[in-house]
Amino acid sequence: MTARELESNATELVAASPVPVLISARSDVVLASGAAGVNLPERDISVRDARTLLGQRLIGRSVHSLQSALEAERDGADFVIFGPVWASESHKGAQPAGVETLAAVARAVGIPVIAIGGVNKDRIAECAAAGAAGYAAIRLFQ
């Protein structure tokens, strides 16, 4: 998909959505489409640079460790997406962190933690019990 197609699709989604839309990794598309914010991969631009570009829009950071979550919070992220908590088809080969590590991250930071990776209907309650503010999934919604 070209950048123009992505921006066009995002603009349509933002206009039609009754909830805030976050764009993955593309601060430029956030600005062009009027989206509510961005989620940055762990090895993307810094949260501080994204904040300079996006102002008060939501900025999240995908993280895979407690240290990265603490750094994201320190740098001004509004939330973190932590995982993979369990083995995941979309992240084959990635070592699952486990629900205990999810709980440690949720206790350690003062911003919302979203669980990702291997989340299914049977694991939603475990995410909440660990202190996650929510969860993200792909297969759960297919």
Image: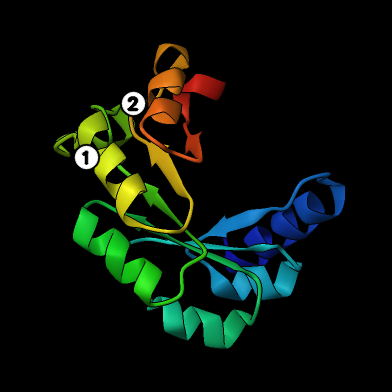
Is 53 above or below relative to 133? Answer: below
Can residue 2 be seen by looking at this rendering?
A: yes
Counting the numbered discs, the total is: 2
Can residue 43 be seen by looking at this rendering?
A: no
Front residue of this view, candidates 131 and 122: 131
Image quarter hosting the N terminus: bottom right
Using the rendered view, name the quadrant where residue 98 is placed: top left
Front residue of this view, candidates 53 and 110: 110
Secondary structure under badge 2? loop
| Three-letter code for the amino acid on which mark 1 is drawn | Thr
Front residue of this view, candidates 119 and 142: 119
Secondary structure under badge 1? helix
Q: Which residue is mark 2?
A: 118
Q: Position of residue 138 (x, y in %)?
A: 47, 30
Tell me which residue sits at (38%, 78%) in the image: 46
Tell me which residue sits at (24%, 51%) in the image: 64
Q: Position of residue 33 (x, y in %)?
A: 74, 67
Instruction: Name the colouring of the figure.
Output: rainbow
Is 78 above or below relative to 115? Answer: below
Task: Please identify, in this view, whether the residue under mark 2 or under mark 1 is nearer the observer.
Answer: 1
The span from disc 2 to disc 1 (Cα, nearest Å) is 14 Å
Front residue of this view, candidates 78 and 137: 78
Left or right for 81, reference 18: left
| Disc number for residue 101 | 1
Using the rendered view, name the quadrant where residue 141 is placed: top right
